[in-house]
Amino acid sequence: MAPILVVVEHADGVVKKVTLELLTLARSLGEPAAVWLGPGYGDAAASQLAEYGAGTAYVVDNSDMVDFVVAPKTEALAAVVKQASPAAILIASSAEGKEIAGRLAIKIESGVITDAVAIAPDLTATQSVFGGSTIVHSTVTHGIPIITVRPNSTAPEAAATALSRVDVEVPVSEGARGAKVTGRTAATKASRPELSEAAIVVSGGRGVGGPEGFGVIESLADSLGAAVGASRAATDAGWYPHQYQVGQTGKTVSPQLYVANGISGAIQHRAGMQTSKMIVVVNKDSEAPIFELADFGVVGDLFAVVPQLTDEVQKRKG
Amino acid sequence: MKIAVCVKQVPDTWAEKRLRPADSLLDRESAEGVLNELDEYAVEEALKIQEAHGGEVTIVSMGPERAVETIRKALSMGADAGIHIVDDALSGSDALATSAVLAGVLKDRGFDLIIFGSESTDARMSVVPAMVSERLGLPQLTFAQKVDVNGGTITIERQTDYGFDSVEASSPVVVSVVEKINEPRYPSFKGIMAAKKKPLETLSVADAGVAAGSVGTGAAWSVVADFAARPPKAAGTIVNDEGAGGVKIAEFLATNKII
């Protein structure tokens, strides 16, 4: 059976959750094989990949993968594709994942589908477009399907197997070494989960009233182990950093639980969170359109409701 | 410094968007067409670089007849000239075909900088800048929240999940920008009047050096099999806070085993 290649997202030698989701999904499509691009592959990664069913790990241990933007990863991935002859290639729908997918499509002359939320055994991809208002089924009709999959689309389930490592030597071309990474800057302490990957997201909007108002939002997020998000109104006003914006011009999230506080629910915002599995809303205005999306909503002052919720979560955690 | 800015006409950001039942393509007539919001930041960045370093800013757009409005909007902000690729054959083109046409138009014109918005608000794939970079073999400086030009050396801050990477390349380069980068200017009345007289080149697919048979719906390497409106969500429980709103949410979360 032709393998299903899964491009591994990793940091500090550890496989990210979205990759475990993709391996789980890949098992329903064929035999998963992982592709590790860059340094850092070791026992920790190997045991994670084996636990989630990867029979093979193609490893390109070459620092060019991380020292230059995207192009070397695409060349390496194209080389692995040539060697492995996969039935499909799955990549996480991160900003970089989609860029790799796009460039790979040109290199291996194959169609590409981005932002899938599900893939059927016949490789038909399901996409949720226009802010979740329309469900689309798409197929790749030329070459090897390249599909990027949104985080939180599949619940990761372990299914241990024996993993064999295959090292792939890729001479990176001079042309692919054009955009050199000269430094990396962490804007904030990474104590919270990544917004796009988080199982729970707690967001604040115009109703939060100012930067100091985000204190109650962060406290609730921390009690739930959640990521913090913000509406465009809040990021445009400079109340919260721009990279946390959820919406049409920001990040798209589909966590297990999304808690929207003081957010009215304009299309701009809904487009980024409408596919969340469960939505809880706190807003003073009972007419706010966000209530249409709510599984549970409280009409009230977020500065009363949210701290009370935080206390209650703490209490129940014991 | 010769700068190209690639822009796209999209349905108004605030409008409901839908697909046409007949051909599964975006219904572009049902909403007002506007300059893709993130492309406004690309135009602004080009104009700022031009103000600091001189040169010329050319707007490039592929799209139907009415996409010319979008080019005029960018010209009214202050860009110097426009190129409009318009051809019936282009309807239904996927990102691969779009990038091939753009690359064909951009390739021999001596641009030092080719700037994009980081995504369109309709398709939201975010792949065309990377694809154009791949096709032209140029360094990819995408998702920039800051761009610095120092002679032939271009440095950006590339937005990442953890913050940003500093990335450096020698021109010519392909850049895409995120909205954090600047505050786009509004066209002045004078700018709007001047835009009407600025040079606008109209090109066909053949002019771009691309075969008509390799673009459009028929040549797309991925197709929509079917689509449907998302089923309406069952109405949730909405309560008024009478002092125990937070506790009630906690109970709801506990019932659903979230906490």
Image (cartoon, coloured by chain):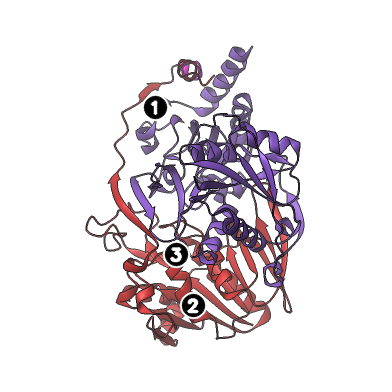
Chain colours: A purple, B red
The residue under the point 40% across, 33% down is: A285
Give the label on residue A295, or none: 1
The answer to whether mark 1 and mark 3 are in CB contact below 8 A is no
- Please name the residue that numbered disc 2 is placed on: B59
| Type of the residue with mark 1 | Asp
Quarter of the image that includes the C terminus of chain A: top right
> The numbered mark 2 sits on a residue in which chain?
B
Say whether mark 3 and mark 2 are on the same chain.
yes
> The numbered mark 3 sits on a residue in which chain?
B
Q: Nearer the viewer, residue B80 or A134?
A: A134
| Type of the residue with mark 2 | Ile
Category of crowding for the residue at label 2, using alpha-carbon neighbours closer than 10 angstroms: few (below 14), some (14–19), many (at least 20)? many
Main SS type for the magenta part? helix
Q: Position of residue A63 (x, y in %)?
A: 76, 56
What secondary structure is found at the residue carrying circle 3?
helix
What secondary structure is found at the residue carrying circle 2?
strand
Q: Nearer the viewer, residue A280 or B195?
A: A280
| Type of the residue with mark 3 | Ala
Category of crowding for the residue at label 1, using alpha-carbon neighbours closer than 10 angstroms: few (below 14), some (14–19), many (at least 20)? some
Q: Position of residue B61 (x, y in %)?
A: 43, 74
Residue B57 versus residue A165 in the image, above or below: below
- Cα gap from disc 2 to disc 1, whole angstroms: 45 Å
Category of crowding for the residue at label 3, using alpha-carbon neighbours closer than 10 angstroms: few (below 14), some (14–19), many (at least 20)? many
Residue B50 versus residue A259 in the image, above or below: below
Q: Which residues are magenta?
A: B241-250
Q: How many numbered circles does the render carry?
A: 3
- Please name the residue that numbered disc 3 is placed on: B95
Q: Position of residue A98 (x, y in %)?
A: 54, 55
The answer to whether mark 2 and mark 3 are in CB contact below 8 A is no
The residue under the point 58% across, 59% down is: A82
Residue B206, quarter of the rendered image: bottom left
